[in-house]
Structures are given as structure tokens and as C-alpha cells.
Image: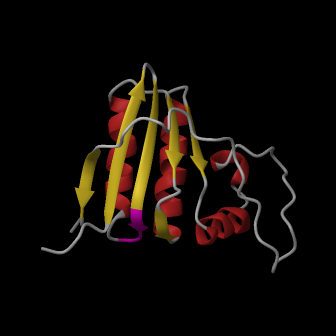
Amino acid sequence: MPLPQLTVYRHDRRKRALLTLSGEIDLESAPLVRTALERCLRDGIRTVDVDLTPVTFCDCSGLNAFLHASQQTTVTGGTLQLHYPPPMLALLVDLAGCAFLLLGLPFGHLSPPLGDAPVASSPAAPHRHVPMVPVLSGEVR
């Protein structure tokens, strides 16, 4: 049995959730990201922090899933923020001009010149000290 491509860990604290994603986010696993974020909203969560420290790869499918989730979260009166995106996702976010939506950076944030590392710092994800238990895992087909 192959190892899961992406694993989602979730820790709730009242109306706030910390999702930690581990693995690769691409066309096959992006639906798992969407499902995890939709479940948070369905469960009444209004602040979603997404820790991407263990993510090894994320393409434009992942960016699209995060942008969709950000829009849905905003519609419900909530917020979604990405923490510690991998370099490829940070570059995609910067090139798409949506850092203010996903990374909590000020609108109109000026990125460094191409060739420099994109700005990807964000506040530390909350309640990281809690042991993680996977809530979703696997390859989506």
C-alpha cells in the first residue's frame, strides 16, 4: 500500500482551527485540501490557520484550493491564513498578487525583485504544541 500523498491534521479551539498539511498538494490532492477546509466551515469554525511547514510541494491546484477556501471563509465572516508556505507556493502567491488574502500581508505589499526569495513570513500558527492526529489522508481519485 503506497504512502498517502497528503495528510491533514486538525486541532480545534472554539471557533478557530489549526490545519497542518503534510505531503504534496497537487491536482490529485487539492480536493482533500478543499474538503478539509469545507469541513471546518461546516463545523462552525470561522478562523482557519493552515500550517504548511511539512508541505514538500504545492502547485497552482493548491493555490486555487486556498483561494477558493479564502473566498468561502470570507463569505461566512471568517478568515483563513497560510503559515510557512513552501517556496514554490510563496512564489505562486506572490506572482498572483494574493499575499494580502492568504498570508496576512498588507494589501499592496511590494515583493522583492524576481530572483530574491519571496516574502513568506507570517505570524506563528497557534496551538502548535498539541499532538497531531490525522483527520484526512490518502490519495484522492
Q: Is residue 79 above or below residue 92?
A: above
Position of 5 relative to 44 (above/below): below
Residue 71 belongs to magenta span: no
* Overall secondary structure of the magenta section: strand
Q: Residue furthest left?
A: 1
Q: Is residue 23 left or right of residue 92?
A: left
Q: Residue at x 58, y 48 (%)?
A: 82
| Image x and y of residue 88, in percent | 60, 72
Looking at the image, the residue that sits furthest to the top is 14
- What residue appears at the point 69 percent right and 47 percent down from the top-left corner? 122
Q: Quadrant of the N terminus?
A: bottom left
- Image location of residue 49, percent across then percent down: 53, 39
Q: Nearer the viewer, residue 128 or 91?
A: 128
| Residue 36: % across, % down | 34, 45
Instruction: Give the colour scheme of this rendering.
Output: secondary structure
Region in magenta? 23-27
Quadrant holding the C terminus: bottom left
Name the residue at 39% across, 28% down: 12
